[in-house]
Image (spheres, rainbow, N blue to C red):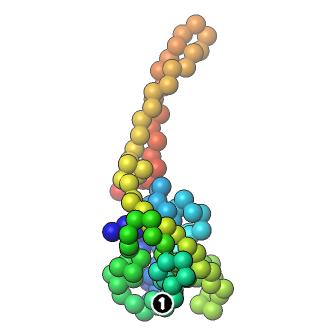
Amino acid sequence: LFFIGAVLQERDDYTTIRELVPGGPAQLSGKLAVGDRITGVGQGKDGAIKEVVGTRLDEVVQMIRGKKDSVVRLDILPADAGADGTHRVISLVRDKISLDKQAARKTVLSVKAGDATRKIGIITLPVFYE
């Protein structure tokens, strides 16, 4: 099964986005933010959206997971909206979440300073580790 690349949590009967996985479909889409609440899940491009407010987190996760390159639609209540705020429906294509995109990377650059060439190391941390 494949996922959308979001770490979810249950908060006040809502399935809430706690974190977006770097390089995952949710983060790359730019359509989701930490704190957004998922109020409904639909399968495919035009399947009915089932309300998930009050549904257990593991059940919502099972609804969001699916086959690679398949579409899941999410009814989203933005983080900054009240309970009766404006919803939006977004479509995401499920994909394999590569841990390589979350891993620390290193690069060594040669930089010329006057007559000398110095090596400078760069460490890229896509996410902070606890």
Residue at 58% from the left image edge and 7% from the top image edge = 115
Tell me if residue 19 comes above or below residue 45 in the rendering. above
**Residue at image coords 45%, 32%:** 107
Visible in this render: residue 20?
Answer: no
Query: Dot 1: what SS?
Result: strand
Q: Which residue is mark 1?
A: 50
Residue drawn where x is 38% and y is 73% of the image? 66
Q: Position of residue 7 (x, y in %)?
A: 41, 69
Residue at the spot 52% in from the left edge and 69% down from the top edge: 92
Viewer can see residue 111: yes
User: In x, y percent, where is residue 41?
Assistant: 48, 83
In-front residue for pair 94/61: 94
12 relative to 129 in the view: left or right: right
**Relative to residue 83, is residue 98 depicted above or below?**
above
Q: Is residue 17 above or below residue 52?
A: above
In front of the other: 129 or 77: 77
> Which quadrant, please, contains the C terminus?
bottom left
Question: Residue 116: x and y, percent?
Answer: 54, 10
How many marks overall? 1
Kind of residue sitting beneath label 1: Lys
Query: Which residue, as the protein is rendered here, is positioned at the far top?
Result: 115
- 130 up-or-down from 76: above or below: above
Quarter of the image for residue 96 reads bottom left
Quadrant position of the N terminus in the picture:
bottom left
Q: Nearer the viewer, residue 32 or 93?
A: 93
